[in-house]
Amino acid sequence: MNGSRLLVAAIVALGCSACSGSGEGAPGGGSASSGGGSASSGGGSASSGGGSASSGGGSASSGGGSASSGGGSASSGGGSASSGGGSASSGGGSASSGGGAGGGGPSDGGTTTCWPYDRPSTAALRASPRKVFAHYFSPYPISLDNQPPANDYYVKGYLNPAGESGAHQYCGGFLRERPVPQTPWAAGTDYELENMKIEVRRAIAIGLDGFTYDVLNPTSGVHRTRLDKLLQAAHAVDPGFVILLVPDMTAGPFNAGVSDSAALQALQTLVQGPGAQPASYHLADGRLVLSPFAANVRSAAFWSNAMSTLAGQGTPLALVPMPVGSFNFASYSGVTLYGASTWGPRTVSGAAAMQAPIAPVHDAGLRWMAPVSPQDSRPKDLVYTECDNSAAFRGLWMAAINGGADWVQLITWNDYSEDTEIAPSSRTQTAFYDLSGYYTTWFKQGAQPPIVRDALYAFHRTHSMNPAVATPDLAKQDGGLFKPVNGPSMPTNDIELVGLLTAPGTLEISVGGSTQTRVVDGGLQTFRVPLAEGTPVFRLVRDGGTVVQLSGAAIDNAIVYQDPLYVGAAAPTCAVVR
């Protein structure tokens, strides 16, 4: 295999989540070994010109319900292909004593000893007109086969470079991490349904209003089955938790190679089947909310006709198009829209530009769904976008907050083929998940939540992405080196510590026999040091004592395969479990 696999020009142009494939190959359809894909493109401003999209009225209904509790934290197991072994070795860090250990699960409002803020009740969060969703990608449920995690399909087929008959040897394995391993369910149990209930509870725990579900195929197959089960799980756990349907216009019967009439028929199947289920997101006026990914694959005339046809059949739509790049009003001239969005950037500079689209969209009487993504790297394409540890993630959240966005879409909950997941996972653990809870409360309440308990979050890679420092074995990684795309041309090789602090203190990072410190004020503080070999240890010290301490993952520049994933660690933490 050679560098021709990269097709970098096409990769930069595409930028899609579903390009990672339809996932019909593994048990239950998990494999997405084929397909294009890219590190996400820019998605900058909402441009005008050539017609206007008219707004649609109506308001989003809230809903009651409560968050289920549960204890535990993200366990390890998932492993990095950079070691070359292909096993599901541990990849995360651990929290140790000093007052930082998380206990129990999140409560439905009030004291939450495992997070740095007191989480408002679910009812209070849902009363906000601002909504937060996470993009659900069906190829990667918690388990693909209900087997013991040490030897399940994630381990054998995806994390192992030799998995799937060696199809991913060229890149060191199809994935670099997996969902937090789940103990198998008893024989005869619908394990996919039960695991989806877990995912719904986890999403509710951090204040999410629902999932945006990437619909790869609305008619048949494993992805339609999983959509039906997720709708069932959401309604069973909490009728107030909704599923916002995202027809993927690059996939299946929606894609550009399909005729308009066939694509419309697929939309009819979607809205009249899954869209009629009680968990599908409807506004108070009864309209079904639809947010098509890569909506600009189809013309404005197509969307006008689709909305008119479906309304005439009894399913009026509230359309929120989500192009891969910038939202452009001209692309939807004459179409009655409810809102607008974009797949968004993954860089610090891109995050800084994401306030700009909001005002023009609001001026048009529409709602803006802001994109927030933690990172983006795609082993199968040997590309990554440099997100500067957690800086792009935090910047995207602040663009949504400061710009007055109406909704946020976390991109993604679980697309492990693009490493954009925020769900509790084997190597990012709960770091992005926990911070998402904090920012969700901030976004919904319109004010930064008071920090009432100290917490630390760490982000770093497990080796340098400078190939002169950490050189892969190109006889094995024979697809070539990973290339940075859609952002900085040089990697950031830092270790980052993010502190949510009740009072001033000293942040410490120890690695490779050296300890570096920074005296900081209370509040949200960050501290970086250059990446170095060893296992980093992170501390908050105050009044001469360690308040919180946690360890990261081992950093080793002696690699076989490259791994651009930023791993995470958090203390204290609480992830909802079974």
Image (cartoon, rainbow, N blue to C red):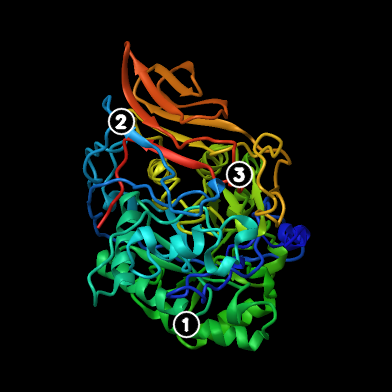
578 on left or right of 79: left
As rendered, which of 361 and 482 lies closer to the eye? Answer: 482
- Per the model, the C-alpha gap separating discs 1 and 2 is 45 Å
Report the residue marked by disc 1: 221
Amino acid type indicated by mark 1: Gly
The location of residue 308, given as percent across then percent down, is: 57, 83
Residue 376, relative to residue 233: is it above or below?
Answer: above
How crowded pointer 1 is (Cα within 10 Å; few <14, some 14-19, many 20+) is rated as some
- Secondary structure under badge 2? strand
558 on left or right of 102: right
Residue visible at 44% across and 62% down in the picture: 154
- Whichever of labels 1 and 2 marks the residue nearer the N terminus, that label is 2
- Closer to the observer: label 1 or label 2? 2
Residue 219, relative to residue 435: is it above or below?
Answer: below
319 on left or right of 381: left
The location of residue 297, given as percent across then percent down, is: 68, 72
- Secondary structure under badge 3? loop
**Decide: marks 1, 2 in contact (CB < 8 A)?**
no
How crowded pointer 3 is (Cα within 10 Å; few <14, some 14-19, many 20+) is rated as many
- Per the model, the C-alpha gap separating discs 1 and 3 is 39 Å
Report the residue marked by disc 3: 355
- Whichever of labels 2 and 3 marks the residue nearer the N terminus, that label is 2
